[in-house]
């Protein structure tokens, strides 16, 4: 099973992101119902490892915190492949991530080491060339400081990701409330 650990987006934030997506001039937009902030990507794992991850995540204690998305950016350097909304202050997200990773390692999962860059994916791009880059640059210059409504993170989840030609479908398998 392909899985990940993430914070789900509440409806007011989804609505704000969807409204912003209406202005994105190119790319394949992320389905607002699939928007999330990934804390850890587990990749393809056997069911017993997913169960071990679940049991480890149940033991995490962390206080609830406030979060706000703000600012936009891209991954892909010269050839942007992803447009994302960033986190205004990622301190608490990173601290939660720093609790999740050791729990997963302790459960026997060996994960690819990646630097956490908290974000919500808004769109994906094919390699498109300079004319499309100009459209994207204009969009970013206009909407770069985009803020979403702030919200309280009261928990996170273990999610299954099913890949389809039309895009991934994410289903929450378990929810872990914060203190």
Image: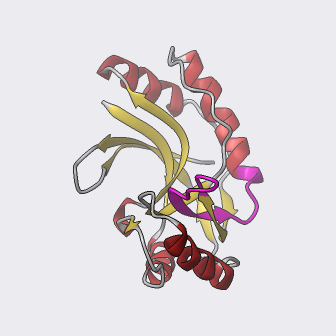
Q: Can I make out residue 110 in this image? A: yes
91 relative position to 59: left or right: right
The verdict on residue 86 being magenta is yes
Q: Can I make out residue 149 in this image? A: no
Point 38% across, 68% down: residue: 32
**Could you say which is closer to the camera, residue 103 or residue 88?**
88
Point 56% across, 26% down: residue: 112
Q: Quadrant of residue 50?
A: top left
Q: Give percent across and percent down for residue 29.
A: 39, 68
Q: Give percent across and percent down for residue 37.
A: 54, 54
Q: Give percent across and percent down for residue 123.
A: 45, 65
What quarter of the picture does the N terminus occupy?
A: top left
The verdict on residue 87 being magenta is yes
Q: Quadrant of residue 143?
A: bottom right
Q: Give percent across and percent down for residue 145.
A: 70, 78
| Farthest residue, direction front | 130
Q: Write the start and end of the magenta stretch as one range.
A: 75-92
């Amino acid at each position: 099973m392909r899985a990940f650990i993430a914070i789900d987006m509440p409806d007011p934030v989804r609505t704000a992101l969807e409204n912003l997506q209406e202005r994105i001039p190119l790319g394949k937009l992320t389905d607002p119902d699939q928007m999330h902030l990934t804390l850890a990507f587990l990749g393809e794992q056997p069911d017993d490892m997913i169960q071990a991850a679940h049991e480890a995540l149940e033991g995490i204690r962390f206080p609830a915190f406030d979060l706000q998305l703000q600012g936009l950016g891209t991954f892909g350097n010269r050839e942007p492949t992803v447009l994302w909304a960033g986190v205004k202050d990622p301190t608490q997200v990173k601290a939660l991530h720093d609790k999740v990773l050791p729990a997963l390692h302790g459960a026997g999962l060996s994960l690819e080491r990646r630097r956490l860059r908290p974000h919500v994916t808004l769109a994906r791009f094919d390699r498109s060339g300079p004319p499309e880059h100009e459209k994207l640059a204009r969009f970013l210059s206009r909407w770069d400081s985009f803020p979403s409504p702030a919200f309280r993170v009261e928990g996170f989840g273990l999610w299954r990701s099913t890949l389809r030609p039309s895009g991934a479908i994410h289903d929450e398998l378990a929810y872990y409330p914060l203190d």
